[in-house]
Amino acid sequence: MVFYLRIVWQAVLFFPFAAALIALPFLIHHYRKYGGMTFARFFLAYSLVLYALCAYFLVILPLPSQEAVARMTGPSTQLIPFSFFRDLSKETGFQLTEPSTYLPALFSTFTLQFLFNIVLLMPLGFYLRYYFRRKMLSAVLITFGVSLFFEITQLSGLYGFYPRAYRLFDVDDLICNTLGGFLGYVLTGPLMKVLPDRDEIDKRSYQKGERVTFTRRGLSFLVDMFFVSILWAVTAIFVPWQFVALSLAYILYFGLFQWACGGKSLGKRLTKICVINVDGSKVLLWRCLLRYALLVIFSWAYWAVAWFFSLASSWVFGSQFLALFLVAVWFFAGVFVLLLETALNRSSNTGRDYLYGRISGTRLASTVLRQPAPCPETRS
């Protein structure tokens, strides 16, 4: 038991890094479909990731040394179904006619490993029925496929990393894992009576998707900055000053290119938002250019003031501490204004945008379609 808990703990420690790797494509997919992220959907998705990591780590860990695996001479496969019941008496001393052997056999490592293989994929059955809305046959086949993937991982020596299989490919494991997924699917039925309705979760996601949240526009910005950096590298070939090249690349991408694409940059297309005029009409070229030129000006002015505070304090007062203090105050003042503007935008019912948007007469709008009709078999 301590061994299993140690592996689960390793999965928990590794989880933030894995979550960061999958966060971007997951958020893009979610925003493209719903336009918003509710806590219930966030919890379901990320608990699924954590469970998948725990299950995979439990299957492959601990990893032996390559030398130890090379010295192994035992069989690598066990292809006789239900061999557990054949070996139960030999491994645990279980005797059907002697009740005193029941408890020792039940709590033996041999039996607990058999039960663990059933429990391992029970959560998968839950997710397949509740989160992915799979039918029973589909869920059983997927569970079998996942179990087969685990067994092949072991049989292949971790995809060729080891010279031979370092764990036994056991057909009983396939049976137990598939049975566990089936049981998880069946037991999810009563739970669905008390769990939040999936249609209601989707409905709230679509309702939230009608607004352009800070997270959504931030995700779009991160994707767009990847392409801006490419354009910046090209622009820097012709413009010797890096900050000028960056500003020019930024305005060309978000102003000219985005306008030509109907107010949708590549990042905005992925997250299904677009720039429009305040009145809801298609954004005009000069407004689009002004919007992002103002953002560049505000950004450079913000850092220029911070640079001025730093130099002026050092030159006039000769105090590095005062310079650091003024820069920190200026930095937190900027963060406070950003948070205040974000809060006002969120509470507004008129699509209020940041200052550069209000001056240019533009705003962001969601292009996610309204919620489709619910599936009549989602509670089956």
Image (cartoon, rainbow, N blue to C red):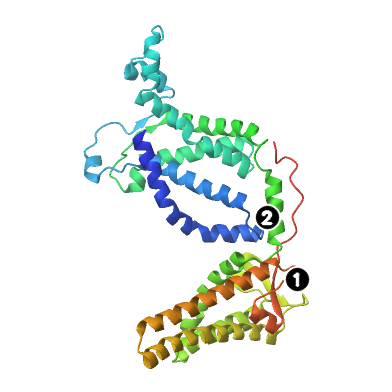
Q: Is residue 249 above or below residue 87?
A: below
Q: Quadrant of residue 153?
A: top left
Left or right of residue 263: residue 52? left
Identify the residue at image location x=44%, y=27%.
115
In the foreground, 351 or 260: 351
Left or right of residue 2: residue 47? right
Q: Quadrant of residue 286?
A: bottom right
In the foreground, 87 or 329: 329
Image location (x, y in percent) of residue 38: 63, 54
Image location (x, y in percent) of residue 370: 75, 58
For the N terminus, the image quarter is top left
Identify the residue at image location x=48%, y=45%.
52
Q: Residue furthest front?
A: 317
Left or right of residue 87: residue 48? right
Q: Residues within 10 Å of mark 1 (few under 14, many from 20)?
A: few
Between the C-alphas of marks 2 and 1, the distance is 20 Å
In the foreground, 8 or 344: 344
Identify the residue at image location x=50%, y=48%.
49
The secondary element bearing badge 1 is classed as loop
Q: Is residue 20 above or below residue 307?
A: above
* In this rendering, the label closer to the viewer, 2 or 1: 1
The secondary element bearing badge 2 is classed as helix
Residue placed under numbered mark 2 in the picture: 205
Residue placed under numbered mark 1 in the picture: 350
Q: Amino acid at mark 1?
A: Thr
Q: Is residue 170 visible?
A: yes
Left or right of residue 92: residue 124? right
Identify the residue at image location x=40%, y=88%.
313
Mark 2 / mark 1, whichever is N-terminal: 2
